[in-house]
Amino acid sequence: MQLEQLRELVLEALDTMKARDVQVIDVRGKTVVTDYMIIASGTSDRHVKAIAETIAFRAKDAGEPPLGTEGLAEGEWALVDLNGVVVHVMLPKVRDFYNLERLWSAPASLPGTRAGALVSAC
């Protein structure tokens, strides 16, 4: 399955399961762990678990079984690792606390500069 097809499969599952505030972040060039991070919210711990389980089931059914899943027992934050696409499903309070969107959307440091250093033009 192509990477874009896998991303679309995940987005369709999130839509079907009525996940909220879905964000797709292209992290190519920022990490070698994955190409896309998809972050979504569930309305309760059971909703978070159901969303993550549905994504894992649909991916497996499409011939792309997850490399792993985490957090299904607790349900505050579940992760589904599909190699090229990593999906985080969280309760809103957990999502606000970790703020992964800000972390992964930040621009990469310029060569020769420290992260967070100011670069001024002369």
Image: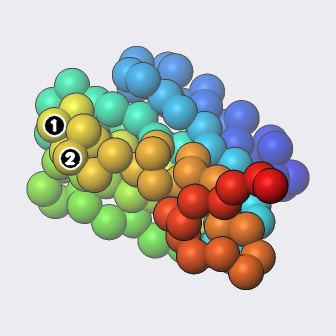
How many angstroms separate mark 2 from mark 1 (CA)?
6 Å
Identify the disc placed on residue 13: none
Nearest the eye: 51 or 85 = 85
Scheme by which the image is coloured:
rainbow
Looking at the image, is 43 positioned above or below residue 64?
above
Q: Residue at x 33, y 32 (%)?
A: 41
Q: How dense is the environment of label 1, judged by Cα within 10 Å: few (below 14), some, or many (20 and up)?
A: few
Residue appearing at x 41%, y 35% in the figure: 40
- Residue 68 at x, y = what percent? 46, 71
Where does the image place residue 62, in percent across and percent down from the top left? Answer: 70, 49
Residue to which mark 1 is pinned: 93
Q: Secondary structure at mark 2?
A: helix
Number of the front mark, 2 or 1 = 2
Kindly identify the amino acid type of the residue bearing the numbered disc 1: Lys
Point out the image quarter for the C terminus.
Answer: bottom right
Rendered residue at 69%/49% (across/down): 26
Q: Residue at x 28, y 30 (%)?
A: 42
Residue 113 in sight in this render: yes
Residue position for label 2: 97
**Based on the displayed image, in which of its 4 quarters is residue 58 positioned?**
top right
Q: Is residue 52 above or below residue 12?
A: below
Which residue lies most toward the bottom here?
112
Q: Amino acid at mark 2?
A: Phe
Report whether residue 52 is seen: no
Q: Position of residue 39 (x, y in %)?
A: 46, 41
Report if the CB atoms under discs 2 and 1 are less than 8 Å apart. yes
Task: Give the quadrant of the N terminus.
Answer: bottom right
Q: Quadrant of residue 7?
A: top right
For the residue labelled by badge 1, is the local secondary structure a helix, a strand or a loop?
helix
Q: Nearer the viewer, residue 117 or 84?
A: 117
Q: Position of residue 106 (x, y in %)?
A: 56, 51
Residue 55 horizontal side relative to residue 41, left or right: right
